[in-house]
Image (cartoon, rainbow, N blue to C red):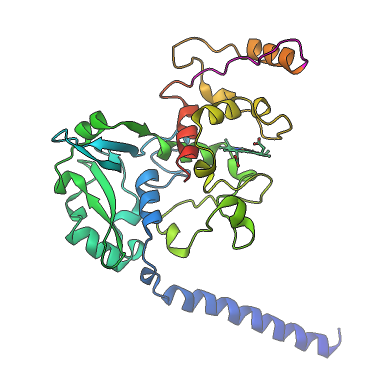
Amino acid sequence: MAFREYKIGCMMFGVALSTSMFVTIFLPGLDISAIGSTEEALKKQLTYGWESGFNYYDPFLAGKDKPIKVTLTHDPVTGKKIDKVDAYVFKPGTHFPNGLTHENIMGKKVLALSNSRGHINQASEENGGVFLVDVDAASGTPYVEFATATKGWSVDATLKAADQQFLAGSGKTMFIREGCWWCHTLLPEETQDWQTFGRPPVTGDFNGESPTTFGSDRKAPDLLHVGSRNSSREWMTMHFFNPRLVQPHSIMPRYNYLWGKTDAKGNVIDRQKWDREFMAYNNGETAYPPEVPEPAPDSDARKLIDFVLNLK
Ligand code: HEC
């Protein structure tokens, strides 16, 4: 080997080494807490709870240890009518997301407001409680409110007063477990993408979210705002049971096994019979496709649909 190649090799090694040393030593020194959580990040944290991927409390990704998102139009304590609001219910023992209490993840300003006005320092995982996301009108800074301390909303009363309950936190675990991210992204890009898939996210949208489920590469539509384009629970139910029912040439797999054994009415789901009837419809032998069973309230299908419809 000529000496010149040796010198070039040494120089290239030097550049690579110093770049990696720079990244290792200086980048952690950046003040990431200067990037405060956006309202979006706080809502995601409170919807998804702590760590949606593989973790000690839910090793088989069953969707355990997750908060419940509810919509309220009546005050759980007084019963009086209020403006429609989303609340996030953590039953006692449910783990809080890291981004809720950690100064560097939440951002200093957001945490200061969440403590002074939102009283989140009174919240504990043992007792659980109800949270809201507010925005300070003057500064535009979002913050978390611990409604159990500020308004007296208990877990039980809030669940009872809720108009709707979304198991979107458990649903995100389903999204990860089922590998939806092999085909779908949750990351519209700063290109013409936004015309079809909506607003691209900004840096502070991801504070404390783990994992971010950006997706691996895109073989199918971006889903970050899919609930805004299509809010039909019926369509989602049909599409997950068999995508070919609503999109004849779809390459998306069927997720009908997420329904479990029985439907919402307790009837046993006969998938083979369903498939036979669907084939008959496909071949033009019958006028209508078979009905899709309604998912049971505690089924994985219901959780996944709640997650998807919440992607606004
Ligand atoms: C093999 C790739 C693939 C996988 C895996 C997959 N999808 Fe899809 N998905 C598609 C394709 C292609 C479309 C567009 C055609 C259609 O609507 O079926 C689609 C469409 C959708 C839509 C409608 C999008 C819109 O813009 O209206 C939703 C919602 C959706 N998928 C959710 C999911 C979820 C949740 C999972 C995981 C349980 C999943 N998909 C897994 C390929 C996939």
Based on the picture, tell me whether residue 290 belongs to the magenta stretch.
yes
Q: Nearer the viewer, residue 114 or 311?
A: 311
Based on the picture, tell me whether residue 258 belongs to the magenta stretch.
no
Residue 289 percent across, percent down from the top left: 65, 16
Q: Quadrant of residue 287?
A: top right
Q: Quadrant of residue 37?
A: bottom left
Q: Nearer the viewer, residue 258 or 204?
A: 204
Residue 107 percent across, percent down from the top left: 33, 65
Residue 73 percent across, percent down from the top left: 26, 36
- Residue at coordinates 64% horizontally, 10% vertically from top-left? 273
Query: Is residue 25 visible to the viewer in this orientation of the structure?
Result: yes
Q: Quadrant of residue 11?
A: bottom right
Residue 78 percent across, percent down from the top left: 13, 35
* Left or right, residue 96 beside residue 194: left
Against 178, residue 27 (above or below) is below
Against 173, residue 32 (above or below) is below
* Left or right, residue 253 beside residue 117: right
For ligand 1, give the image quadrant.
Answer: top right
* Left or right, residue 56 beside residue 111: right
Image quarter where the N terminus lies is bottom right
Query: Is residue 91 visible to the viewer in this orientation of the structure?
Result: no
- Residue at coordinates 23% horizontally, 52% vertically from top-left? 145
Give the extent of the magenta segment: 283-294
Main SS of the magenta part reads loop
- Residue at coordinates 45% horizontally, 41% vertically from top-left? 310
Against 264, residue 152 (above or below) is below
Q: Nearer the viewer, residue 166 or 282?
A: 282
